[in-house]
Image (cartoon, grey):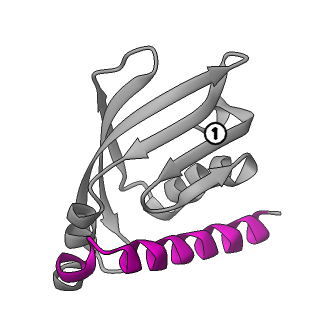
Amino acid sequence: MAACYHDEVEFTDPAFGTLKGDQAKAMWKMLIERSEGKLKVVSSNITDNTAHWEAFYVFSKTGRNVHNKIDARFEFKDGKIYRHHDHFNLWKWASQALGFSGLLLGYTSFFRDKLQTQTRKLLSDYQLRSK
């Protein structure tokens, strides 16, 4: 994905919020590295500017299996992805990744904001280590 992104890309999803440029590119590299080869992605319904994809992985923090169903929209500039918006049900994701606590809190804005703070910190730390 990082290679498909325009230098001025803007990526948005419920887990990370909005990431721009190198942050968005680094996110994919971090997710792949953290998956330790246990990530499976299946794509379908691909059009000029949309795609459906499903990710299967083990959430590292809890060891729980996750099957996340994502709908993506793309805008292109200079032959590369300029805007990438992923939509998925955060409550369903949280229920799988975190179990009971995700089931109880995964639909709240409090949970989303806390998750985005944590994922951005992970990404920032990853980018610092990668330099």
Total of numbered circles in the picture?
1
**Residue 8 lies in the magenta-colored region:** no
**Residue 71 to residue 119: above or below:** above
**Residue 52 to residue 33: above or below:** above
Residue denoted by label 1: 2
Going 18% across and 82% down the picture, which residue do you hit? 104
Q: Bounds of the magenta span? A: 102-130
In percent of width and height, residue 113 lies at 47, 75
In the rendered structure, the answer to whether residue 42 lies left or right of residue 26 reads left
In percent of width and height, residue 71 lies at 33, 38
Badge 1 amino acid: Ala
Quarter of the image for the N terminus: give it: top right
**Residue 129 lies in the magenta-colored region:** yes
Going 51% across and 70% down the picture, which residue do you hit? 116
In percent of width and height, residue 53 lies at 32, 37
In percent of width and height, residue 8 lies at 75, 38
**Residue farthest bottom in this picture:** 101
Q: Quadrant of residue 33?
A: bottom right
**Residue 81 to residue 69: above or below:** above
SS at badge 1: helix
Look at the magenta stretch and give its main secondary structure: helix
Q: Quadrant of residue 2?
A: top right
Going 31% across and 58% down the picture, which residue do you hit? 57
**Residue farthest right in this picture:** 131
